Image (tube, coloured by chain):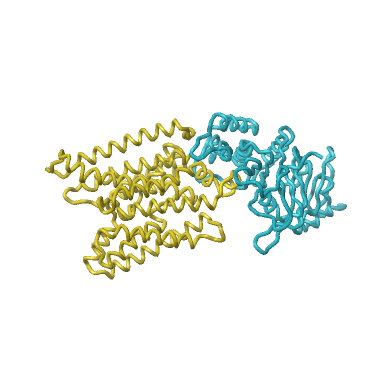
Amino acid sequence: MSGAALRFEGARFGYGARTVLDGVDLELREGEILGVLGPNGSGKTTLLRGATRVLEPGAGAVALLGRPLREYDRRSLARAVAVVPQEGAPLFPFSVLETVLMGRAPWLRPFAFEGEEDLRAAREALVAVGAADLAGRDLAELSGGERQRVVVARALAQGTQVLLADEPTAHLDLRHAVSIFALLRGLSSARGLAVMVVTHDVNLAALHCDRLALLAGGRVAAEGAPREVLRADLLGEAFGTPVQVEVRPDGRPFVLPGAGGPM
Amino acid sequence: MSPRATPGRLAAACAVLAAALGASFLVAASVGPAGGASADWEIVRTLRLPRALLAALVGGALSVSGAAFQATLRNPLACPYLLGVSGGGAFGAVLAILAGAPAAALPAASFAGCLAAIGLIHAAASRRGHLLAQDLLLAGVVANSFFLAAMAVLQYLAAPHEASRILHWTLGAVRPGSVPAALVGACVAAGTLVVLADGTRLNLLAVGDETAASLGVDVAAVRRRTFLAASLLTGAAVAVSGPIGFVGLFVPHAVRRVLGPDHRVLVPASFLAGAAFLAAADTLARAAFDPYEVPVGVVTAVLGAPAFVLLLARRERGAPEGGRP
């Protein structure tokens, strides 16, 4: 087994008295891309918050790169974990390069400007996401798909070993959704990044993720290779709607909504 | 799109704006009442320069305050004039006027009003360690309407000579000598430094709370200290000059259009630009209709409002023609 970049052990998360997730045992391994699926309100975003110390576990523990998460301060955490959040356009017209350079913030001293090394990291990140030609553009004038690539570049410029993405393909058309997943897949295999993607895109996750975790009923209902998790019985129960699971020619499963059966 | 913020760009912007500030001081020093001894060094030294210096401090403070409020509250309309702090300061001064306090006591009363307003707004917006932009904004706007309404009632009920003092004070004017310039300068320097030190973090807050948090920013702490620093700047400015509108809204927007949104450049540049703008506006206020002095708050609004509309119209250049009247 390669090392665990992120490990939840019997973790419980909630808001005040309300428990959202309990008994979470889950591992994100180095160099893998893990898809987190589950119905709305099943705790997918809560899991991400638990991984970034926005929420502290009420029970159990979370470890990041072999160290308990609570030993990290904000800055060292931001140097270890990058997040691609679901957030709209910024208030003011920052350029694409300025946006990607923001990923260097955890490495900057107060009052400092980004130096040569930061600029190199930002440009390299833009190349890695295939958005080098956008560097001079205003972020606000990009399409949703372009903007999402830039946000991934910002996370890359952060220079972390772990990348968490919160529904990175929401609102994207088919082509851009495919390309974002392919990009994340490539980053995990080429750079050894540990990538955890929260998504509703069951089929893209099946296609691009090494492993999947299905959250339902406040716990991890299933975890494993895509064909182990994407089973009609598990999904039907988790989402409360009948589904059919077929197998693509490449052996990966794909999910069709509806009861199916003979015509 | 403006080029990226660098130390060189910051230095160049500051050099140009400092020259503008110097020019506005020169004009302030040489413009006097018609037929007056405008070359008299004694008048320049004891009257005109201290007043220009104070106007510059107030303009710089309001502009930095506006830039800080806009970023930390994630709202381009945020400005010291709208957010309760300035209203609280005016209310404090009005209460002091009604209590028969001498003019010398008004800055202290106004500053106390600002502090009370800050405490109120902060307490109303805080929720279990969280401090959300929209809560602060709402609390500030609500507090401001309360103070304005209360002042209107008090002014209506006041005796004529008190009502005229209230009107005079609330229109805003730079009044040198009412507070030691060093005290105002210390407040303004402290508030500006706090905002300046958070330049990178304010950029991240302008993108979003989640983004900022994931990049290592303690969002609640930065929002709290930026709010307090911006409020202190507002309080210091209002105490010496009464509420002066438009500077805090207009200057950061104008600077942002030219120099870009990066707060590491925006904040110092806004200070210098606001200082130059208000020193010039104050000279205009005292000299334009000599021997009558126009309240400088009226000058900034009369100059600022059309300039702001121009700024907005320029931004909509790409919009379809039918979208504009």
**Residue A128 against residue B215 in the figure, above or below:** above
Relative to the observer, which residue lies in front, B27 or B115?
B115
| Residue farthest to the left, as pictured | B35
**Residue A137 against residue B113 in the figure, above or below:** above
**Residue B153 against residue B136 in the figure, above or below:** below
Q: Is residue B207 left or right of residue B254?
A: right
Relative to the observer, which residue lies in front, A56 or B156?
A56
Residue at 28% in and 60% down: B105
Chain identifier of the yellow chain: B
* Quadrant into which the N terminus of chain A falls: top right
Chain identifier of the cyan chain: A
Q: How many numbered markers are drawn?
A: 0
| Residue farthest to the right, as pictured | A262
**Residue B19 against residue A39 in the figure, above or below:** above
x, y (%) of residue A204?
Answer: 74, 43
x, y (%) of residue A194?
Answer: 72, 40
Q: Is residue B125 left or right of residue B299?
A: right
Location of residue B127 by image quarter: bottom right
Residue at 31% in and 61% down: B93
x, y (%) of residue A221?
Answer: 80, 54
x, y (%) of residue B35?
Answer: 11, 43
